[in-house]
Structures are given as structure tokens and as C-alpha cells.
Amino acid sequence: MAAGVVQVRSGQGAGGSWEFAVAPPHPRLRPGVLSYRGIRLAMDRPRRRLEAPIGAATLLLGFEQPVRISRAGRPTDTLVSVYCGPTTTPAVGEHGGRLSGIEVLLTPWAAFTLFGTPQYELADRTVDPDQLPHALASRRAGDRRRSVRELSAALASLPTWEDRFGLLDDVFARWREVGTPSSARVVRAWSELVRMGGAMPVRRLADEVGWSVRHLENRFREQIGLGPKAAARVLRLQRARRLLAAGRGQAETAAVCGFYDQAHLSGEFKAMTGCTPREFMVARQGPVEAGAPAGDRMSGEATSLVLAPPGRT
């Protein structure tokens, strides 16, 4: 399959050089596979970013350099390629200044199909994708599907981003064909929850797809990784961050997104990002180190904060 139109942004400054390449996956893979983003950074010092929860799973196919990912209450992970399912807590990623690879965003139900692992086992965690249970079982059974490490090496060897994204299209299409099908009702429920920005009662969502609340909760945990109530919290806060970044006030944002009041919005913001709405937006508007673009994971979203390098404030 041919990759979609690739848009490349690059630059160089006092802090180093950078390049981002983005493209939509082939239509055959959508809406499950959301986006591809190629990354090349050659900075003169370490970089740290806070990543807020989003309504997607993330697969980083690293080409060479490792990243260190820390999350409250968990040991720090140092990995070249990383899978992270849906989360309700923030994570801090750090690298030594040089980083290259491709970041793939997936709907949680598509990740369930591609990797065949119950998503509740991966919620609020970062893991080496080749250590997922399905990957280990496939290798023991002699499955010819290439490992993520082999895929990353193949991607790194190709000359252009177009070639790399085209290979991903082909590989994901094959993985999906042999993967565990996701439930059409889970896909429908998730799509409706996304459409409503999380502002939909769980009982109504269950009624929409013809399941009991208990059954919906169980299937969501299996194929989304979070229960419908937790997933709605993440999507509601994601919408709130988007509105605040667009200049909406906190009181208006709280009302539009279905929070009880401004204090409820602030509490949820603090719980899921580690800072208040004001602190998050002030940090996003602060000066960014020369040659170090912010690069939110999702287009048009406020997903990340660039943090001061270690030892600096």
C-alpha cells in the first residue's frame, strides 16, 4: 500500500537540528490506526517532556537511541521501542538529545487487534512491545510475523519517510488480518464516547450498544484498557485541554465539557496531568529552547509540556 501525503518540517538552531514527518495511514487501516509521525532529533543536551493522558495507544518504533519513561509509583523504563496503552496518569519521557524513530497512534481497540493482548494488562504502563504475551507466544509457535525490533531495523534502513510509512501500512495490514478481531459494539461505543468528548453517561452508552453496564465495563477493560467511566474522564479532559489551549476560560470550559464546576475541572486536571489548568497553559506558553520544537503527539491537541533538562530550572 502507498503511504498518504507526507508533510515534513525541519529546522536547525543553537540547540541542534530536528525533523518531523507526519502522514495519515492508508485508508484501509483507518479509523483504527490514527497517525504516523517520524522523528529525528540531534540536540546538544537531554530533552524531557511531560505527556498527558490521551484517548489513544502509542507505539514508538525506535531506530537506535533509548528513551527513559517514568510514571509515579512505577520504576523508570529505558527502552528503544515502547508501547503505551491508555493512561489516566502523566508520564515523563527523557532522552539524551538524539532520538529517531516513528510514533504511531492507535485507537485502543485497534491496538487490541494488532497485539492480541487484553488491554487492561497494559493500562498506565510502558512496555517493550516484543515482550507482550502475544509476541512471545508467536515466536514460540514459529509465527513468521516479524518482531517489532526487526520492523524498526527495516524502517531505519529505508531512505525516505514515504518508504517507511508505506512499509508500516503493509505490515499493519498483515498484522490486522491475523490479529484478534475487536468487537463491533466496543468500536461503536468507543467512537460514540470520542464523539461526545467523554460527556456521555455509562448507562446510556451501554443502552446504545445493547449491553448491560457490567458487560460493557468488562469488554472495555479487555479491548480499551480502561473502563468506560475512566475512558470518559480521559476524553473529557483531553477536550478541556484543547479548549483551554484555544483561549477558552476555565469556567466556560468546565461547563462545555460537562464538569460540575471549575473546581472539578481543576481537580481532574491535577490528578491526570500533575498540574493545574493554569500551570499547564502557562508552561505551554513559556519560552521554548531554541531549536527544540514542542511537537504535540496529536494534531490540534495540547498533549505535552517541554520540561527543563535535568539539573536546570
Image (cartoon, rainbow, N blue to C red):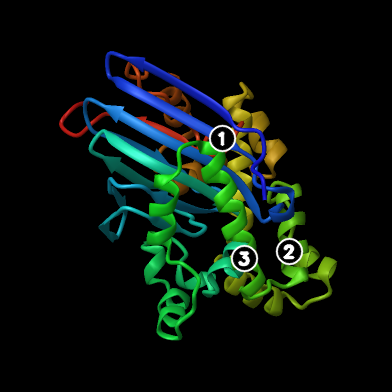
Q: Nearer the viewer, mark 3 or mark 2?
A: 3
Indicate the position of residue 176 as horizontal and vertical percent values.
Answer: 64, 67
Q: Residue at x 28, y 35 (%)?
A: 98
Residue type at numbered disc 1: Val
Residue that mark 1 sits on:
22
Quick check: marks 2 and 1 in contact, CB under 8 Å?
Answer: no
Discs 2/1, front: 1
How far apart are the two marked residues, 1 and 3, measured between alpha carbons?
22 Å
Of the residues under marks 1 and 3, which one precedes in the sequence?
1
Q: Tag 3's secondary structure?
A: helix
Residue at left offset 72%, top offset 75%: 213
267 left or right, relative to 40:
right
Classify residue 209 by image quadrant. Answer: bottom right
Q: Nearer the viewer, residue 56 or 281?
A: 56
Which is nearer the N-term, disc 3 or disc 2? 3
Say if 300 sits above or below 260 in the image: above
In space, the residues marked 3 and 2 are separated at their CA atoms by 20 Å
Q: Which image quadrant: the C terminus? A: top left
Mark toward the viewer: 1 or 3: 3
Identify the mark nearer the N-term, 2 or 1: 1
Q: Which residue is mark 2?
A: 187
Question: Would you place residue 102 above or below residue 178 in this image?
Answer: above
Residue at which label 3 appears: 174
Left or right of 145, for residue 63: left
Crowd class of label 3 (few under 14; some 14 to 19; many from 20; radius 10 Å): few
Looking at the rendered structure, the kind of residue marked 3 is: Arg
Q: Position of residue 284 (x, y in %)?
A: 44, 25
